[in-house]
Amino acid sequence: MCVPIMAMGVLSFWQQTGHMSFDMSGTVQNYVEALTRDMYRVLFLRSLGISGLTTLATVVMAFPLAYFIAFYVKRHKMVWIILVTLPFWTSYLLRVFAWKVILGYGGAVNSGLIALGAISEPLTFLMYNPTAVVITLTHAWATVAILPIYVSLEKIDRSMLEAATDLGDSPFIRFFRVTLPLALPGILAASVLIFIPTVGDYVTPSLVGGSDGYMIANVIQFQFGRGSNWPSGAAISLTSMTIVAVLVAVFVWSARRLSGRHS
């Protein structure tokens, strides 16, 4: 893993002079452009926004199912876990294309609403925008969120919940005072596992995002592909990776400190 990153680091200080020729004298111009160019800034902020919404939506949707499996399923829990992982048995591209069919102009959602008489013509805001990217990514990464949350919930000592009940806590208060803080490690793990890869996703924005849903990874992919500017792509990649790493570290540190105050 270190070797590719080191190679990217060296490449980011070069200048592309031809199709496969480089000026290796060394320059920080690629980093200056990555940090100051308005287009890169807009796309990176959009990437953070889309990934943040995806992470929040996925965790919120995954928690109830993980909670149900951990606390209410008494037998054959492994069957439920296998069912949860079923989406991973299919190609990621197939799942993205499935959502393209569902949300498309003539897709299942529009066809169903027209058949019910709810709308007279297909809705155009369902596809080729950040909303479509968030919906698709949320479904694609749901399994990744469910499993670590389930593990944290499964490890909770049930006697602590019984003690909270004996002390007069209602189920609602017990959930926020005992269950949720103890499940925080799983929630943090799920959040990190979703946020980091979705920031760098370029397949989903390309297929369902349209021009309004493009993310910073699409620029990186372009620079290494048709743009034929590998040093620029390397500088943008490393800059994005560093900023994301700092944000994730601050998020985890803040969440743990907040958890410590409530424990």
Image: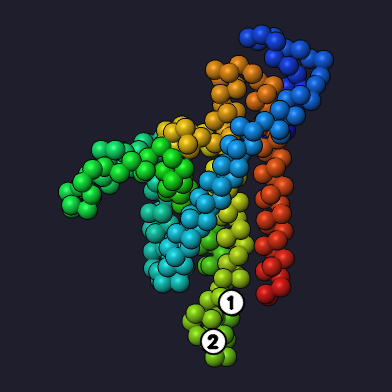
Q: Say the numbered circle drawn on residue 72.
A: none
Which residue is drawn at the image coordinates 54% and 81% (left, top)? 173
Q: Amino acid at mark 1?
A: Val
Task: Find residue 178 and name its label.
Answer: 1
The image quadrant where one finds the C terminus is: bottom right
Tell me where residue 177 appears, x and y as whole percent.
59, 78
Judged from the image, the secondary structure of the residue bearing numbered disc 2 is loop
The foreground one among 257 and 117 is: 117
Q: Is residue 238 above or below residue 62?
A: above
Vertical placement of 172 versus 123: above or below? below
Percent position (x, y) of residue 87? 39, 46
The residue under the point 44% across, 37% down is 209
The part of the image, by quadrant, that contains residue 196 is: top right
Where does label 2 land, which residue? 169
Is residue 101 left or right of 165 when viewed as pictured? left
Task: Answer yes or no: is residue 223 visible.
Answer: yes
Q: What amino acid is at disc 2?
A: Asp
- Mark 1 → mark 2, Cα distance in angstroms: 10 Å
Identified at 56% across, 50% down, the residue is 52
Q: Are marks 1 and 2 in contact (CB under 8 Å)?
A: yes
